[in-house]
Image (spheres, rainbow, N blue to C red):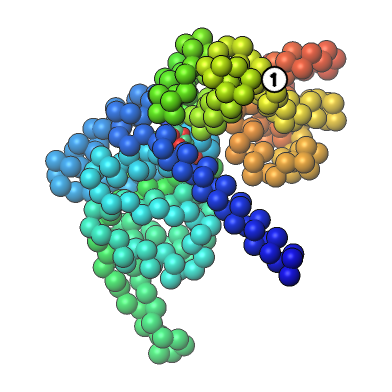
Amino acid sequence: MDNIQDLLQNSVTSTSFQEEADKQENILRPKMLKDFQGQQRLKDNLSVFVAAARGRQEPLDHTFLIGPPGLGKTTLASIIANEMDAEIRMTSAPALEKPKDLAGILTNITEGSVFFIDEIHRLKPALEEMLYIAMEDFEIDWVIGQGPAARTMRIPLPKFTLVGATTKAGSVSSPLSSRFGITCHIEFYTEEELASIIARSAVIMQVPIEQDAIIQLAKCSRGTPRIANRLLRRLRDFASVMADGTVTVEVVNHGMERLGIDTNGLETQDRNILRTIIEFYDGGPVGAETLSISVGEAIESLEDFYEPYLIQKGYLKRTPRGRMTTKLAYELLGIPCKRNMDDNQGILF
Ligand code: ADP
């Protein structure tokens, strides 16, 4: 009995923790395009497409958002809905188990709504086929009955905008990706863009922070707004417990050291990944599965979270034969590079 009580208690605690984290994230989520920092080209184009669709009194074309986690895909989906003055329905592909789950949502959305599917690369094939017709013809085929008596009914749908988000554009089938009229690649943010995100979040969260500290924190935020906001919350804790409440450069440096984050935004696991490739696999190439086992990290988080930033920073390369470290990685870790890295395989430096 006690165990069940404990289990229930734990599940309540972890749900509340997740809810609290989501609530904190939602408070900081910009509502309109003008508040969405950075990604200037994407914003400029999107605002033209939104204005044109509004002018024609039509829903926006289906929109495909591509980029690593935490860069603002969910935020952009709700901004699109707000800018179009439309309702939004949000789900993620793993939550859609059966065709009836998808059909249930599609037949219940209202004219002009935005329908957001996160992690769209994980959509099951049967659901993907249903989505093709829904996106193109605003209809779905629904089979009634079984065996010889089965017949297909076409159900008309209200016109809607599908916003699909993925961290893995390469895993989305071309029939699906080609049905999106607008494709937005969200890039890692520059330090200046992150600094303006941090300044905005600090105002909303009422955290006193010095300008130098904003710049220092931006450097450590891995080009990612979600990380910048999360670190700001931790620094608020350090500042209130260990200083007078104001986040200064000293508080940032101290906090980052305690959290194992360097001024490139690299975490302990990033350095562990690079060190493992160098020390166990002589700098690579090493396959993603082998690497994920060696560093004790799920392959999804290795590929979606760690690798994109290491590649963007020039420490890692993906080659057809596997992952390889670059000269920069050796320099970062202070490991002398004994290997003669010639460029025959189109890799390294
Ligand atoms: P994703 O869906 O790509 O994982 P989210 O849209 O959930 O990322 O963004 C994570 C958090 O980062 C949001 O709470 C939001 O506050 C913040 N954020 C993301 N992009 C921006 C931006 N361009 N400007 C300001 N805040 C942003």
Seen at 68% across and 44% down, the residue is 299
Quadrant of residue 102 within the rendered picture: bottom left
Crowd class of label 1 (few under 14; some 14 to 19; many from 20; radius 10 Å): few
**Is 23 rendered above or below residue 175?**
above
**Is 283 rendered above or below residue 46?**
above
Which secondary structure lies at badge 1?
helix
Q: In which quarter of the image is ligand 1?
A: top left
Residue extending farthest to the bottom is: 149
**Is 159 rendered above or below residue 343?**
below
Toward the viewer: 210 or 219?
A: 210
Residue 95 in picture, x, y percent from top left: 51, 59
Q: Quadrant of the N terminus?
A: bottom right
Toward the viewer: 79 or 97?
A: 79
Residue 262 visible from this viewpoint: no
Residue 32 in picture, x, y percent from top left: 30, 34
Residue 9 in picture, x, y percent from top left: 64, 58
Q: State whether label 1 is within 8 Å of ligand 1.
A: no
Is 124 on the left-hand or right-hand side of 115? right
Seen at 85% across and 26% down, the residue is 279
Is 306 on the left-hand or right-hand side of 164? right
Seen at 57% across and 47% down, the residue is 17
Q: Quadrant of the C terminus?
A: top right
Residue 80 visible from this viewpoint: yes
Is 153 on the left-hand or right-hand side of 145? left
Quadrant of residue 221 within the rendered picture: top right
Toward the viewer: 103 or 223?
A: 223
The residue tagged 1 is 257
Residue 78 in picture, x, y percent from top left: 35, 43
**Is 43 rendered above or below residue 110?**
above
The amino acid sitting under disc 1 is Glu
Question: Number of numbered discs present?
Answer: 1
Residue extending farthest to the top is: 212
